[in-house]
């Protein structure tokens, strides 16, 4: 949706909510709500419609609404909106997005109990005062509590693995919809950000209403939030969690420009619109226009091309120099999702995994890998059933036996060795010297000289890879107290490999530091940290971070085939 279309739709929805909250006549509330829905469903730019005088010909946009639209487009303000919102706390109307909480109940809670925001609402529920209001009671309050739970789940950012799973499910289902021509996830999910705000799917089709109807009948849908001709919004339930999924329907000849627009990011789009303006063009979700004539929009490639740019991969669209690189034809040839030949961090039942070495080997063969490293934890990781020296050597003997049976893949004898608080490694050098590959990691003492400990491990001649160098857990833990710039400088000096850990809760190094490592000439490995067979699929998220970090195939060592890797690691 064009920015002005979106702004005006939201304004009219808020006016309707405010009037209903204040007890205005129903027909007035419905008029504003209908206008909002009509504007939301428009496939044309509302500024163009207003300029050409066509706005008043649209059903649902009467003389009064049209004047208010014109006022807003010319001045950036709307007197009716300011009047409607007067006396209503800013956060209050947002609560009407809570299922089972109507405007009359909210108005009563505001007047009698002083409810102004979500925290207030929760307070009056917990102290029992809401249930005592006229015509309320425990049952209604319980339903509002359920609505709050759904609302809060919809507001949170979604881990990329969960968002991807849901989007894949929706796309797979919608591909069977009648008349569908094209489909793709959009937004931050398509850009492979580590957490996702909204799950948005873009569809190219002519019969939008039928697509939306088909979408609302998808298995797992527990609530339909909106169902129009060009937009649908539902709440889906997977296992014990609920998520909002939105789809938008556009014509085929606007699919490319819409996909570009809805993929974002905001900063990237602003820069593109500025570039278009400099060239005498206008760029919107509907297409690229020269005056009244549409000159591009069917595909993303032609949108970028008409702006004098090479097509920019979605993962790069953050306005971090990608537009300038596209202008100069110096965009990186990003690592591909099919380039990976193996995985250097895999755990088994011998430490804290849930699959045997053989099961992990078979799964890696199915993925087409040429090699994997078995990196069970070292002895100090008591919480992870870390291996003693004797158990490690026994594991390596088991690998030797399996290697004779599975000749199509190289099973590397390895370890994820702890970097202790003393700075020493958890296994002696004489043991590490026997490993094919050594991955060193901090798992304890996060505030205890971490920079020095990592640098000391990097200096060890037997260490090949530093795992999850920042130690963060997304939305749970910030990470170590560490000077990453110093760690990177040390890795460059000693020519050591840094890990992009593809575990969705880690994604460490992040994209910013991965790009910095590339700029410094440091090689990286993308590893899953898999603890069972299913976890091997996390590789796609690590590759997504690598692509966001501008990494190419040559920057990542596990894109090498076995012969190349053997030579590189001097095995």
Image (cartoon, rainbow, N blue to C red):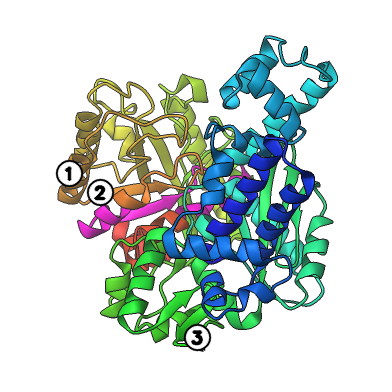
Q: Secondary structure at mark 3?
A: strand
Q: Secondary structure at mark 2?
A: loop
Q: Is residue 538 magenta?
A: yes
Residue 392, x across and y down, in percent:
46, 32
Using a 10 Å C-alpha cutoff, classify the residue at mark 1 as few (fewer than 14 neighbours), some (14 to 19) or many (20 or more). Answer: some
Per the image, the residue denoted by label 1 is 490
Per the image, the residue denoted by label 2 is 496
Nearer to me, 336 or 99: 99
Q: Secondary structure at mark 1?
A: helix
Using a 10 Å C-alpha cutoff, classify the residue at mark 3 as few (fewer than 14 neighbours), some (14 to 19) or many (20 or more). Answer: many
Count the marks: how many? 3
Residue 184, x across and y down, in percent:
62, 67
Which residue sits at x=40%, y=73%? 312
32 left or right, relative to 11: right
Which residue sits at x=34%, y=34%? 431
Using a 10 Å C-alpha cutoff, classify the residue at mark 2 as few (fewer than 14 neighbours), some (14 to 19) or many (20 or more). Answer: many
Per the image, the residue denoted by label 3 is 296
Q: Quadrant of the C terminus?
A: bottom left
Nearer to me, 83 or 103: 83
Q: Is residue 421 above or below residue 33?
A: above
Mark toward the viewer: 1 or 3: 3
Determine if residue 19 is in view. yes
User: Which region shows up in magenta?
Assistant: 514-542
Compare marks 1 and 3 and give the one earlier in the sequence. 3
561 left or right, relative to 22: left
Q: Quadrant of the N terminus?
A: bottom right
Instruction: Please say if the residues under marks 2 and 1 sit with CB atoms less than 8 Å apart.
Output: yes
Mark toward the viewer: 3 or 2: 3
Q: Is residue 543 magenta?
A: no
Determine if residue 3 is in view. no
């Amino acid at each position: 949706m064009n920015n002005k279309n979106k702004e005006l739709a939201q304004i009219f929805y808020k006016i309707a909510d405010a009037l209903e909250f204040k007890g205005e006549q129903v027909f007035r509330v419905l008029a504003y709500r209908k206008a909002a829905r009509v504007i939301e469903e428009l496939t044309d730019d509302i500024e163009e419609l207003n300029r050409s005088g066509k706005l008043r010909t649209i059903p649902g946009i009467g003389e009064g609404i049209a004047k208010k639209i014109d006022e807003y487009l010319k001045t950036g303000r709307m007197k009716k909106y300011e009047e409607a919102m007067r006396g209503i706390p800013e956060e209050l109307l947002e609560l009407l997005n809570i299922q089972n909480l109507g405007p009359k109940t909210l108005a009563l809670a505001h007047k009698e109990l002083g409810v102004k925001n979500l925290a207030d609402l929760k307070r009056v529920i917990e102290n029992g005062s809401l249930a005592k209001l006229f015509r309320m009671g425990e049952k209604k309050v319980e339903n509002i509590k359920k609505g709050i739970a759904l609302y809060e789940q919809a507001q949170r950012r979604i881990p990329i693995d969960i968002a991807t799973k849901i989007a894949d499910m929706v796309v797979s289902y919608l591909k069977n919809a009648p008349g569908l021509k094209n489909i793709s996830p959009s937004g931050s999910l398509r850009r492979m950000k580590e957490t996702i705000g909204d799950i948005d799917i873009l569809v190219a089709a002519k019969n939008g209403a039928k697509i939306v109807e088909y979408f609302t009948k998808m298995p797992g849908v527990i609530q339909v939030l909106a169902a129009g001709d060009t937009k649908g919004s539902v709440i889906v339930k997977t296992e014990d969690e609920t998520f909002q999924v939105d789809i938008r329907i556009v014509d085929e000849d606007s699919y490319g420009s819409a996909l570009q627009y809805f993929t974002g990011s905001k900063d990237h789009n602003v820069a593109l619109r500025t570039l278009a303006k400099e060239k005498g063009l206008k760029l919107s979700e509907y297409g690229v226009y020269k005056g009244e004539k549409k000159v591009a929009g069917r595909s993303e490639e032609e949108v970028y091309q008409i702006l004098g740019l090479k097509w920019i991969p979605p993962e790069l669209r953050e306005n971090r120099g990608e537009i300038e690189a596209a202008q100069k034809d110096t965009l990186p040839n990003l690592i591909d999702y099919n380039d990976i030949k193996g995985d250097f961090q895999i755990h088994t039942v011998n430490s804290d995994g849930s699959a045997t070495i053989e099961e992990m080997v078979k799964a890696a063969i199915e993925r087409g890998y040429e090699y994997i490293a078995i990196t069970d934890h070292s002895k100090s990781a008591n919480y992870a059933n870390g291996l003693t020296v004797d158990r490690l050597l026994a594991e390596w003997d088991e690998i030797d036996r399996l290697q004779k049976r599975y000749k199509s893949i190289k099973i590397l004898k390895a370890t994820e060795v702890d970097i202790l608080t003393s700075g020493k490694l958890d296994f002696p050098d004489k043991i590490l010297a026997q490993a094919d590959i050594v991955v060193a990691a901090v798992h304890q003492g996060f505030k205890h000289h971490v920079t020095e400990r990592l640098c000391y491990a990097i200096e060890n001649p037997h260490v090949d890879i530093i795992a999850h160098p920042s130690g963060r857990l997304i939305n749970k833990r910030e990470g170590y107290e560490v000077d990453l710039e110093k760690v990177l400088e040390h890795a460059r000096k000693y020519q050591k490999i840094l890990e992009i850990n593809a575990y969705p809760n880690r994604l460490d190094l992040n994209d910013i530091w991965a790009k910095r490592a590339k700029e410094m000439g440091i090689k990286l490995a993308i590893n899953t940290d898999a603890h069972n067979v299913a976890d091997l699929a996390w590789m796609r998220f690590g590759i997504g971070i690598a692509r966001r970090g501008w990494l190419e195939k040559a920057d990542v060592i596990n894109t090498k085939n076995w012969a190349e890797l053997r030579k590189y690691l001097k095995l």
